[in-house]
Structure formats: C-alpha cells, structure tokens
Image (cartoon, helix red, strand yellow):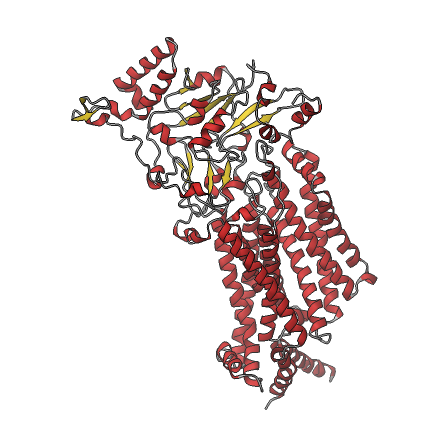
Amino acid sequence: MTDLDVRKKELAKEFLPMLLKSTKWSKIWTGVLVGFILWGLIALVLQIINGHGVTGMRDNVVWGIYIINFIFFVCLSYSGAFISGVLHFFNTPWKNSVSRIIEIVTVVSLIIGPVFILLCIGRLDRLHYLFLYPRIQSPITWDVIAIITDLIGCFIYLYLTFIPDFAILRDNSIGAPRWRKKLYKFLAIGYYDTPKQRKRLHSITRIMSAMIIALAIVAYTVLAWIFSLTLQPGWNSTIFAPYFIVAGLYSGVGVIIIIMYLIRKYLKLEHYIRKVHFIGAGVILLVISLLFGYFTFSEYFARWFSHKTTDANLLDTLFNTYFWEFIFANYIGVLVPIVILFFKRFRTIKSITFAAVIAVLGLWLNRYLIVVPTLETPYIPIQDTRPEFIHYSATWIEWALSFAGIAAFVLFFMLLIRLVPIIPMSGIINYEREKKKNSKPLAQQQLP
Amino acid sequence: MKDDKTTPSGTNRRKFLKMGLLSGATTVAGASLLANLASEEELKASGEKIRVLTADGKMVEVDAESINKYPEAHITPEESRMGIPGRKFVMVIDLAKCKNARNCVESCQKAHQLDHNEEFLKIHLIQDHEEADPYWFPKPCYHCDEPPCVTVCPTGATFKRDDGIVLVDNDRCIGCKFCITSCPYSARQFNWSHKPKFDDTSQPYSPETSVPGTEGTVTKCVFCPDMLRQGKLPHCVTACPMGVIYFGDKNEDMVTNGEETVRFSELINDRGGYRHLEHLGTKPSVYYLPPVNRQFPLERGFDVDEDIIERYRDVPFVQDLKEQGKI
C-alpha cells in the first residue's frame, strides 16, 4: 500500500461521517425547507388551475418577480461556471477548498433558474411548440439553446470533477450502506487514479473548464439581449450584456461567500475554509463591486444627462415610486460592500459575509428596478387602463414560489454535499502530491 | 398594382371611384368601395357561368369567378396566415375630429367579445409639449411593417401577412409575453385567467376575429380581416360618429371613413399625415392627421362615466382640470 492510498483512507475516514450521519439540525432544516417547497407547490397548483390572474402581473408589467428570480439564479449559475472555469483553467493554488462549492452552486442554480421562466409562460402545455415551430430569429430561441447547452456543459464538468472522489469513496467507504457503495462504483466509471487516467481526466477537465467559461459568456449575453434587443426605453442599452456579466459575477461571488460561511460554521470545516479564502473572495467581490457600481453609474448617468423624454420618465418613476428601492439597490448595495472590503482592518470573516449579504440583496433589487419600473414606463405613458392594471405588486403566490425556489436551492445543495464531500478529497491528494514533487528538486538544488 | 392600371376593369373602377368622389360619396359608396376591393378577382371574367339563388328567391346566372371567395365563411388559423391577395391595408386617424366618444372602443369590445375594461383600442390623452393643448389620441395596433413583436416570437404564433395585417394565432401562442414587452406602443393584451366566454364554441376560433379568446395567450387589435373579406369596414371605423378613422388599401391609394372616400396619398400629403414614434423604425400602417382646426373642445371628451375619467387620473392635465373643478 502506497502513501497515497493510506492518505486516501484517512481522508475518507474524515469525510464519510459528514456524508452518512445526519444531525438533529440538518433534519430540522430539511423539514423547514420541505415545508417551504410544499407551500410553493400549493401556490403552483393554484396558479396552474386559476391561471396567471392569481399573480400580480398584468398587461403592462407582464413579467414580475418570476423573471427577476430567473435572471438572478441563471446569472448565479453562469458566474459559478465562469469563476470555477477560471480557477480550474489557471490552476489557482487555493481553489481546492471552494471549488466544489462553486461547482454545486453552478449546477443547482441552473436547475432552479429555468423553473422560474416556466412560471412566466401562460401555456405550459404548449412548451414543446418551442421545438415544433422554432423561429431562430427570436432571442427566446437563442436563450433556450444557450441554457440547454450550458446545462449539459455544466453537468459534464461537474461530473468530471466528481469522478476522482467517487473513486476514493468506492474504495474506502467502510460501513456505508450497500446502495451507496453500488452508487459510487457506478459513478466512478472504472477510474483507478492510474497516471494515464489521471492525465486524461485532467486534460478533459481543463478543456471543459475553458469551454464553460465561453458558454457562460454566451449565455449571459443572450440573457441580457432578451431585454436590450427590445425598444423599451429602460432596456434598449448597448452595455446590457457586459453589465449583466458583471452583475451576475457580483451576485455569484456574494452567494459563494455566504455559502462558505454557512458550511464553515455548520460543518465545522474551519481547518479547510480559512480566513485567507474569505479575504481572497472578499477582494474579488471588492473588484467586482467597483465594476458593478461603475456600470450602474454609466447606465443611469447617460440617461439622466441626455434626458430624452422617455428616459426622463423612467428616471422619474425610479426616483419617485421606487426611491428607497433605488437607494438600497444602487447606493447601499454597492457602497457598503466597497467600504467594508476596501479597508484591511474591516476584513473579518463576519464582515465580509455581511458585505456579501448586502451585495446579493442589493443586486436582486437592482434587477427588480431593471424589470418592473421599465414596464411601468413604456413609450406611450399608460392611460385608459383600469387602475389595478397600472402598478405591479407581487402576490403571495409569487412570493411563495420565490421562497420555494430558494428553499429548493438550499435543499439540493444539502443533498449534493451528502453525496460527495464538500472539500474535494482528490484535490487534497493532488495538492500534496504536487508539493512532494516540487520539494524534491528544491532539495537537490540546495545540495551543491 | 401596376397590373391593375393596364387592365380595362381597373380603369373602370377608378372612373367609378372618381365619380363617386365627385358626387359626394355616401356611406353606401364607402362600403361598396371595399366590397369592390375585396373581390378584385371577380373582374377577370372566366366565361364559365354558375346559377345561384339570391336572397329574395330569384335565380340568377353569374360568372364563376365572381363568386365571392371570402363570404362569412370560417377562416382557419392556417388560412389566416395568407392575407387577402394584392392588398396593403392602412388606417388614417384624423385627430382633429376625435372627442373621446368611445364608440370605437365599445363596438370593438362587442365584436371581439371583450369585457368592459378590456380594449384592443385605447384612447390616450396626449400633450405634445407644454404650449400645446392636449388632444384625444385613439391607439389601435399599428400593424407595423417592421413589427418587433413578430421578430421576437419564438413559435411564429404572431405573424405579418402579405396584406400588412399582424395577427396572433392563439392556438400556437405559448404565452411567453415577449411580444408584449417588445411592442413600443403597448398594443398587446394578455388573457390572464379563464373566462366563461372562452368556452363559447358557437363560432369556431379564427385569428382573424380573435374570438373566442384562449386563457394564457396574447391578443390584440386585428384590423378586422373578417369584415374586410366581406367587403365591410372594421368595427371601429363604422362605429365612429365623427368619422375620425379612415381605412383602406394603400395599393389602391384609397381610404374611407364610411362617409367620404379620399385618396390616401392626398390625405397624407395635404394634411401633414404622420406616424407615431416614426423614429423607432417600426413603420406602422396607422397614420395620424395632426389635430389642427379641432372640431370639439377637449372637455367634451370628459362626458363619460366616472370610471373612464379615472383612467386618465395620472395625466397632469386631468389633474389640473380636477383641481379647477371642471370635471
């Protein structure tokens, strides 16, 4: 038995209890989450039976918080794919502790996100018409293609990163139930970590990591085009595609920091997820918050300075009807994280997580302000319409389904980290192997 | 319509129209103009004769080709994509004559089985700038020649026909609402919930009437092609007591409001016709004549129910009027 095999056994011993045993708290949490999901399912059934009339969406604001959640989750996924791809491709040294969190965020949010766009569709029973009567010039068709391609790409990528860990678990899961062993054996697809296999897997993963970066950029862009290719005064903007990329990364890094905090705290992984990771992620969040603030400023400043009538009307709506939302989304949501993350002495784990929470909430609201006020301020101001059709406010059905989406996200995440360790064991092995390899020539250099 | 000018029948019709104009056209003439338009092919005689029974019980012999191809027959969604051959329908709205009588809205609602507060045609109160007096502004679907709604539809449920009309096929629509957000004129509506009237199968569904409606799909003004096929004018045109709305065929260069029939090009050029938000590049088929020499004081438009006035409460001008206690 080589050193590596011993080390693998040790790691399996360390992480297996996390996969097999459920604590009291995890049971309670699962119960709460399932409760939220059931509540959302009731809302869904009501919406399907009674039609979209049960939502707050009406003829002017035809898309409400469903599409905001859709953008939010899908952008979360794209940013996860982007960050994970970059970490893998450039072989970032401290990536191992966070890479699996990012990968799981990518895939889980890409499963939840499209569910929200389905909730916007009036005739779900005709969804297959998208493939029966496709029209390639429609940005919706582009988005369907982009999301499906991205979903497949991300699944392949996630699975590739899982294979070495499945192999370790297959060989070392002592005391695990039989179905679990069988599952690991099946999922490991005969991977035995031989040098040849390792090299091949490494090169495939590297290619896929580069591909999902490209996929994420394409998918982000197409998503932004759903809005910016229309003529609507608040949407028809040339910077929307890069703006969506930056905004997506902003929420992505924010959510990853929040999850890092929760996992570190509740799974007691202080040894693996350290302050240095938070500081690293915090600095990235700082850079992106500066970029995001810059884009937001450019977008609104140009509208305000040139003040075309339609733009002026939009800004009027934003600064009257949506004053506090605008302040929170575009001032507090950007400036607070910048201030916290800019000064070194403010950079503690808790304050960085707080900045991330503010960033994520601010960004969600920023999306709300992109979608709803624009639809309330079309080219021809809304008139001769029944009063209850003018302004949008989400109903409990929409909120229930939104919270069910968040609950499903957390629940899927919890289920996936019961299947594979949240810290990639194979990554630790690789890291130690590299260290050994590098230390040898160093020792030889010192000899003469 | 180069062909028409060379055929004798086309010339005859033109002469007839000219005479009609000179002798002061009547409602009947206006309607018969469109009757002529809708059955253009009749004039190319085939020689084959068919005997038909008229409504008053007489047997008459007519040319086979002159049988109207488009009676009140049902037009299926598939047929409705074709359009009426050789036509390019346009609408001209004379803003000087509109007083928000809302007959157009009501007749449209009746014809398309719309509820009291659902409307394909809205009447806006527009003020061009601070110095200008506001005016009433009927806004149907503009049936654009570069329709953004058609471009973005992922299933081809909404389409542009050869005769210029943009329709929605409710059997094809998946209800993604992208067309609603892409329309800069807010011309589209959505059937948010099921209504008993949707179950009415007394007339089969046709995109040309948009009746009966379907839950979860998009709907809008259709330019009433079912009426056009019968040689009649759209409901809003005939319902208007002021003759505000002119309708006709751009290829024939004729429009009528049911009372007077005029040349489309002359009307547009002599009276400064324009299209709303021309700079968006959507090329609407609906033209407006500027509100010069207005025939009614604006306030006449407020002789409507309280709930209709409520619909204009966000207009600054209406708020001023309310403060002064004028309405």
Q: Nearer the viewer, residue B29 or A173?
A: B29
Q: Nearer the viewer, residue A192 or A261?
A: A261
Q: How many marks?
A: 0
Residue A103 image-quadrant placement: bottom right
Q: Residue furthest bottom?
A: A1
Q: Nearer the viewer, residue B91 or A391?
A: A391
Which residue occupies 33% across, 40% down? B76
Residue B42 image-quadrant placement: top left
Above or below: residue B106 compared with residue A408: above
Above or below: residue B163 compared with residue A15: above
Measuring from the top left, give residue A285's x and y in whole percent: 71, 58
Measuring from the top left, give residue B269's x and y in whole percent: 48, 17
Residue A138 visible in the current orientation: yes
Q: Residue furthest right?
A: A345
Which residue occupies 56% across, 18% down? B291
Above or below: residue A264 compared with residue B13: below
Is residue A399 shown left or right of residue A293? left
Residue A214 visible in the current orientation: no
Measuring from the top left, give residue A37's x and y in whole percent: 58, 62
Q: Quadrant of the C terminus of chain B?
A: top right
